[in-house]
Image (cartoon, rainbow, N blue to C red):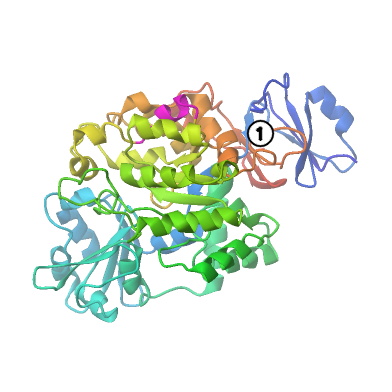
């Protein structure tokens, strides 16, 4: 049978050992059927074969974002983007002219550093919004928010609350909420009463977002947000069109999930569509450094960070043990060194064959002793290099000052993990950082954003160009247990391909971040085609 399409490129990095000089890739029924030379391709071609000639472009395995929130991210990024705000005066100025959405002021991506030495408190914004305007502002970490008095009253949040997980409605000494909400359970009080969009609009918005992701070179993503109705959204997209990215979706398992809930999560693993599947479960061991909810071996400068998200960490261990018995893969959010240690301890106590099923997300500060355990235990690490852009090389930012210099100097230890032999998947955690993989690949090598003169953050942790590319290809596949299906360009593997105008292995990272993306293919379907 002749292939559906043949892709030609002057350079093809197969990442599949040394298959010789490959310049042609044949695709049929969503799979790679042959690799070889342009001369070979003449023999493969049939009357219905489409020839895609990329000229001087460089073809690599389709890039996969190792940690993304495309559906949840649309909710998290509702309203005004505050990423350009640098101080309280700027925040007040932007909010004063922000348009209302069904009477609410909604905004997101606010940097903790904007508050400087001031606490996160609704009093700094309420006078510019008026006494009757509900407002909900998400901070950039996605784990905390600032709500005004009217928003809190609409949610019935009039004082402290107790939750099944470690979450906080921060209050003044008299018990009045400050508006600072830390962790999902606290934020959910307000999000439950906020205006929302109908499913059809969210379906179309998700499809458009995935097309933009494909235009940057993404062929797939490990999706950490199966809460809400994401499965309904992806089904709705596939009812009428192709899902632009191959989505591997992990539903959340929060503290308090009982035996029946775990059975339901295990049963969900059978759900799939043409270009998506449920694959694993997402858990949270802790929160964020800036919110004081990361679990640290030693308290931060405010005396916080002394506990995990689970009120009893042994419950987390038992949940992972039960999921492992079902054969379910897990991905655990663990920011602080104590949180990472507890996850590693949990995996170490599992039967040996199950260890490779369990990975750790984020890993923002960690010492060498615990870092060496990743390779030894076969635990994949999933990290987002561009998260360190919220810190500063001189450690004067909110994240670093909370931890102190010693812990700040062992931040985002990407290179240490690779050098010890660990699997390291890379991603963006969109919308916490931008989803464009070109920027992440460049940042992983530069430890700063491309095209800036910002001092690099912990430059000794920079990855090589090959390590960075592997983080989006071979190592992303390993982290998901999919090495036999994707991550390389080889016959029999899924036809996920990405082409760049510049070579990601040899180009200057500053230049590569703006490299054109002539082609993206996901599961054998072209999802981005620019100038081909």
* Residue position for label 1: 488
Q: Picture quarter containing residue 118?
A: bottom left
Residue 336 seen anywhere in this rendered image of the structure: no
Q: Residue 289 at x, y = what percent? A: 27, 48
Q: Residue at x 73, y 32 (%)?
A: 490
Against 11, is 139 above or below? Answer: below
Number of labelled discs?
1
Q: Residue 258 at x, y = what percent? A: 48, 68
Q: Residue at x 64, y 56 (%)?
A: 276
Image quarter where the N terminus lies is: top right
Instruction: Specify the principal SS of the magenta part.
Output: helix
- Left or right: 519 with respect to 40? left
Q: Residue at x 40, y 37 (%)?
A: 385
Neighbour class for label 1 at 10 Å: few (<14), some, many (≥20)?
many
Image quarter where the C terminus lies is: top right
Q: Is residue 414 magenta?
A: yes
- Left or right: 39 with respect to 221? right
Against 189, is 366 above or below? Answer: above
- Which portion, as a residue range, is magenta? 412-421
The residue closer to the viewer here, 262 or 416, is 262
Q: Residue 297 at x, y = what percent? A: 26, 43
Q: Picture quarter containing residue 138?
A: bottom left
Residue 293 seen anywhere in this rendered image of the structure: yes
The kind of secondary structure element at disc 1 is: loop
Against 134, is 307 above or below? Answer: above
The residue closer to the viewer here, 242 or 411, is 411
Q: Is residue 399 magenta?
A: no
Q: Residue 400 at x, y = what percent? A: 22, 40
Q: Residue at x 15, y 50 (%)?
A: 302
């Amino acid at each position: 049978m002749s292939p559906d399409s043949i892709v030609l490129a002057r350079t093809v990095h197969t990442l599949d050992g040394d298959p010789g000089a490959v310049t042609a890739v044949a695709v049929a029924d969503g799979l790679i059927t042959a690799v070889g030379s342009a001369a070979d391709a003449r023999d493969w071609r049939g009357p219905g074969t489409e020839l895609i000639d990329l000229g001087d472009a460089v073809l690599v395995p389709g890039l996969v974002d190792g940690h993304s929130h495309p559906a949840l991210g649309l909710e998290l990024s509702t309203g005004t983007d505050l990423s350009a705000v640098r101080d309280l005066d700027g925040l007040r100025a932007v909010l004063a002219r922000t348009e209302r959405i069904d009477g609410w002021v909604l905004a997101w991506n606010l940097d903790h550093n904007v508050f400087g030495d001031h606490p996160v408190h609704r009093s700094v914004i309420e006078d510019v919004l008026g006494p009757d305007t509900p407002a909900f502002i998400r901070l950039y970490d996605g784990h905390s928010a600032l709500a005004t008095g009217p928003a809190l009253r609409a949610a019935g949040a009039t004082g402290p609350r107790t939750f099944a997980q470690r979450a906080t409605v921060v209050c003044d000494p008299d018990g009045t909420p400050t508006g600072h909400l830390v962790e999902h359970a606290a934020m959910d009080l307000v999000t439950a009463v906020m205006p929302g969009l109908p499913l059809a609009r969210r379906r179309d918005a998700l499809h458009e977002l995935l097309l933009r992701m494909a235009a940057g070179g993404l062929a797939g993503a490990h999706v950490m947000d199966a809460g809400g109705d994401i499965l309904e959204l992806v089904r709705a997209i596939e009812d009428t069109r192709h899902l632009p990215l191959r989505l591997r979706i992990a539903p959340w398992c929060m503290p308090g999930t009982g035996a029946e809930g775990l059975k339901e999560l295990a049963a969900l693993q059978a759900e799939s569509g043409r270009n998506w599947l449920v694959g694993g479960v997402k858990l949270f061991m802790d929160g964020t450094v800036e919110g004081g909810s990361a679990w640290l071996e030693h308290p931060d400068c405010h005396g916080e960070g002394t506990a995990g998200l689970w009120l009893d960490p042994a419950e987390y261990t038992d949940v992972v043990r039960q999921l492992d018995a079902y054969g379910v893969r897990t991905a655990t959010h663990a920011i602080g060194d104590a949180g990472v240690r507890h996850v590693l301890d949990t995996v170490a106590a599992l039967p040996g064959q199950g260890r490779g099923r369990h990975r750790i997300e984020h890993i923002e500060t960690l010492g060498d002793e615990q870092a060496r355990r990743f390779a030894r235990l076969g635990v994949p690490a999933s990290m987002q290099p561009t998260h360190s852009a919220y810190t500063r090389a001189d450690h004067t930012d909110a994240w670093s000052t909370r931890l102190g210099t010693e812990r700040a100097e062992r931040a985002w230890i990407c290179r240490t993990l690779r050098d010890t032999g660990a699997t390291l998947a890379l991603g963006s955690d969109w919308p916490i950082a931008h989803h464009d993989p070109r920027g992440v690949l460049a940042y992983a090598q530069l430890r700063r954003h491309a095209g800036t003169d910002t001092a690099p953050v912990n430059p000794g942790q920079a990855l090589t160009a090959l390590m960075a590319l592997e983080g989006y290809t071979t190592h992303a596949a390993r982290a998901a247990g999919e090495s036999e299906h994707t991550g390389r360009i080889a016959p029999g593997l899924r036809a996920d391909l990405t082409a760049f105008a510049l070579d990601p292995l040899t180009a200057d990272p500053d230049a590569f971040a703006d490299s054109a993306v002539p082609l993206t293919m996901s599961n054998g379907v072209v999802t981005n085609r620019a100038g081909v």
